[in-house]
Image (cartoon, rainbow, N blue to C red):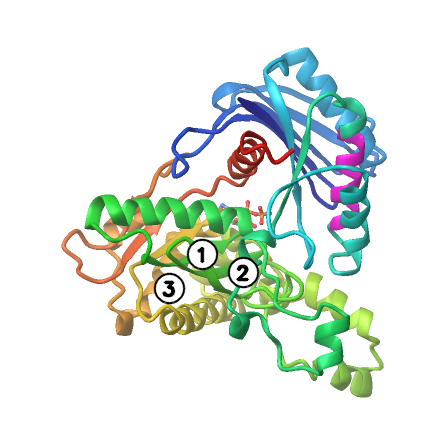
Amino acid sequence: MSVLVVNAGSSSLKYAVLEPSGDPAAAARRLGGGTVERIGSDGARLRHDGPGGRAVDDEAVDAPDHAAALRAAADALAAHGPSLDDVTAVGHRVVHGGEDFSGPVVVDDRVLARIAELAVLAPLHNPVNAAGIRAARERFGDVPHVAVFDTAFHADLPEVARTYAVPREWREEHGVRRYGFHGTSHAYVSRAATAWLQRERGTDPGAARVVVLHLGNGASACAVRGGRSVDTSMGLTPLAGLVMGSRSGDVDPALAGHLRRVAGLDAEAVEEALNGASGLRGLCGDGDVRDVTRRAEAGEQDAALALAVYAYRVRAYVGAYAVALEGLDALAFTAGVGENSARVRADVCDGLAVLGVQVDPARNADVAAGPGDVVPVHPGAAAGPAVLVVPTDEEGEIARQAVDLLTAGGD
Ligand code: ADP
C-alpha cells in the first residue's frame, strides 16, 4: 500500500508518496514527492523529486493559496510520477488535535470542521492544515483521507505532566493543558531507538526509557517509557520548552504584564516576538544553527552565548526527564540540528556526565545517517545510556499510521 502524504505549513506545502515498511521500527520507502514554497507570494516555486531524492523539476508556479499549491503538486505528480494508481489513502499532517483527537482519524466533513475550529489553539497551523485537506479531498475524492495529529502521541500524558497549576475554570472550560507537539517524530524516533536497545543491549522494549531530542527549527524533548510519551517540553502551544531558531521556549509567564507596563506592548505583540524574534535569533541575530556555530567558532561572544543557552536548556530537560523516567537507557538526537550538528550534540552531552552519558568525539564528528539508520555516538564500551542519532521520518510515520488505521477497519 502506498500513501500520498500532505504537510501544509504556513507558506509551504510538502507532499510525498510513501510505502510504509512492514517493520514499524523501519523507515518508509519514499517513491517521490516535493515542496511548493513561498505560497501566497509572486515567487512561489515547486521542486519535485523522484526515487532516491533525484531532482526532476524546479519551476515557478502560480500558488496564491494552499489550494493552488496542492493543484500544482498534483499536476507535478501526474507529469513526473510516481504514479498515484496504487495510492490507497491520503495522509495529512495536522498540528493541533486539541482534546478531540487522540489518534489518527478518517476525515469527513465533521472532522474537517473541527480541525478548522481548533485554530483557536494553533492559529498559525490548523487553518492551513485544513486548507490542504479541503483541496486534497477535491482533487483526490475517491480515496480515504486520514488526519494525523502532532499532539496525538502525547494524548495520554500522565495527569501530573499534562496539568498546569492554573485556575480550574481555565483548565475545565478553555482546554488549558500541556498538549505537546512533534508527535509523529517522537513516535518514530523513540520506536527506532527502542528497537536498537532491544537488539543491541537486550533491553525490554516495554520498559525502555528514551529521551528524544527533536532539534529542528522548532525543538522539543520527549520522555518515552515503553513506547509511551510520559512528558514533553512543548505545552499548550509549540512555544514552550527548549530554545529554538526564533522561539524563546520557556520564559517567566509574568513577562507579558511586565512588557505592557514598561514598554506598552500588548499581549499579541509579546507573543509575536516570543515566536519570531526570540530564541537563537533573539540572542545573536541568527536563527540557523549553522550560522550561529560559524560565528561562535570565529569568536563572536553573542553567538557563543546563544549556543551555550541552547545546550544548557536541553540538558536541564534531559535531567528532568531522567528523573521522570527513573533512569535513562538512550538519548536520541533527531531533526535538522540533532542529525547534523556534532557541536550541539557534544555541548549537550558534555554536561550530562552525572547521568553516565558519554560521547565518542570521533564517532560524533563523523555521523552519516540516512533514512532508517540508528547511529550510536557513545564510546564502544560505554556502560551508560546509549547516545543515538536517528534521522526522523515524519512523512513515513504519517503514511504508516494512515495504513494502520485503514487496515484495522477504522473507516
Ligand atoms: P523544521 O523544524 O523546519 O522541519 P529541520 O528539522 O529541517 O526544520 O531543521 C532545520 C534546522 O536544522 C536549520 O534551521 C538549521 O539550524 C539546522 N541544520 C540543518 N543542517 C545543519 C547542519 N549541517 N549543521 C547544523 N545545523 C543544521
Q: Position of residue 151 (x, y in %)?
A: 61, 54
Predominant secondary structure, magenta span: helix
Q: Nearer the viewer, residue 78 or 46?
A: 78
The reply to whether residue 400 is in sight is: yes
Q: Is residue 135 magenta?
A: yes
Kind of element beneath mark 3: helix
Instruction: Name the residue tied to disc 2.
Output: 156
Residue contact between numbered discs 1 and 2, judged by CB atoms under 8 Å:
yes
The magenta segment is 126-136
Separation of marks 1 and 2 at Cα, in angstroms: 8 Å
Kind of element beneath mark 1: strand
Viewer-nearest of discs 1 and 3: 1
Q: Position of residue 295 (x, y in %)?
A: 50, 59
Instruction: Name the residue tied to disc 3.
Output: 347
Instruction: Name which of mark 1 and mark 2 comes first in the sequence.
Output: 2
Q: Residues within 10 Å of mark 3 (few under 14, many from 20)?
A: some
Farthest front residue? 409
Instruction: Name the residue tied to disc 1.
Output: 228
